[in-house]
Amino acid sequence: MLRPINPAGAVIPGISQAVVVEHGRTMYLSGHVPMTADGQVLPPDLEQQLDQVFRNLDATLAAAGASSRNLARITIYVRDFQADQLPVIRRARDRFIDPEHPPASALIGVAELFHPDVRVEVDAVAILPLDA
């Protein structure tokens, strides 16, 4: 369904440079935030917030009969991003995605998100089977 494209040369570890959709239905996932089922925003620890965001994304994917293996692309927005946060972001992301078949990805530092305690938001595009 998804075919990663990774040309020779410099690559960013843990992502596909591009993903070709061979067949399937497109699912667009809204920005997911570190909010629990009861509407509480987690404390501002970046890794804890990322884990909650990825749990929320996983729940949305599961509701559609999909998993992180169906992801074609993710975009991670980090408030006040600093380069030394990259290992934390990768560690959390790699617990969620299949590092052997990573989606195309982007990491964007932003000045603000919708709530002052939210440090991270992730949106995504997934491809679902035609018969699901």
Image (tube, helix red, strand yellow):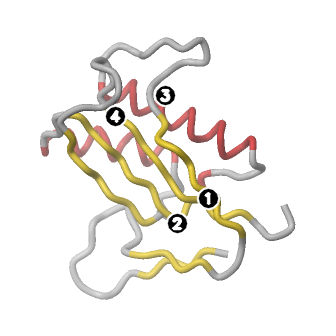
> Gap between marks 3 and 1, in whole Å?
18 Å
Disc 3 and disc 4 in contact, CB within 8 angstroms = no
Residue 52: which disc? 3
Query: Which circle's residue, 4 or 1, is located before the other in the chain?
Result: 1
Mark 3 or 2, which is nearer the eye? 3
Locate residue 41: give its quadrant.
Answer: top left
Disc 4 and disc 1 in contact, CB within 8 angstroms = no
Query: Which circle's residue, 3 or 1, is located before the other in the chain?
Result: 3
Mark 2 or 4, which is nearer the eye? 4
> Gap between marks 1 and 2, in whole Å?
7 Å
As drawn, is 10 to the left or to the right of 64?
Answer: left
Disc 1 and disc 2 in contact, CB within 8 angstroms = yes
Residue 69: which disc? 1
> Gap between marks 3 and 4, in whole Å?
10 Å
> Gap between marks 2 and 4, in whole Å?
23 Å
Query: Mark 4 — residue?
Result: 120
Query: Mark 2 — residue?
Result: 101
Query: Which circle's residue, 2 or 4, is located before the other in the chain?
Result: 2
Q: How crowded is the residue under tag 3: few (<14 C-alpha within 10 Å), some, or many (20+)? A: many
Give how far across and how far down residue 124 sits, in percent: 50, 53
Amino acid residing under circle 4? Val
Label 1: element kind? helix
- Residue sitting at x 44%, y 48%: 94
Quadrant placement of the N terminus:
bottom right
Locate residue 9: give its quadrant.
Answer: bottom left
Q: How crowded is the residue under tag 1: few (<14 C-alpha within 10 Å), some, or many (20+)? A: some
Q: Is residue 104 positioned above or below 39 on the image? A: below
Amino acid residing under circle 1? Arg
> Gap between marks 4 and 1, in whole Å?
22 Å
Quadrant placement of the C terminus:
bottom right
Q: Is residue 120 positioned above or below 106 on the image? A: above
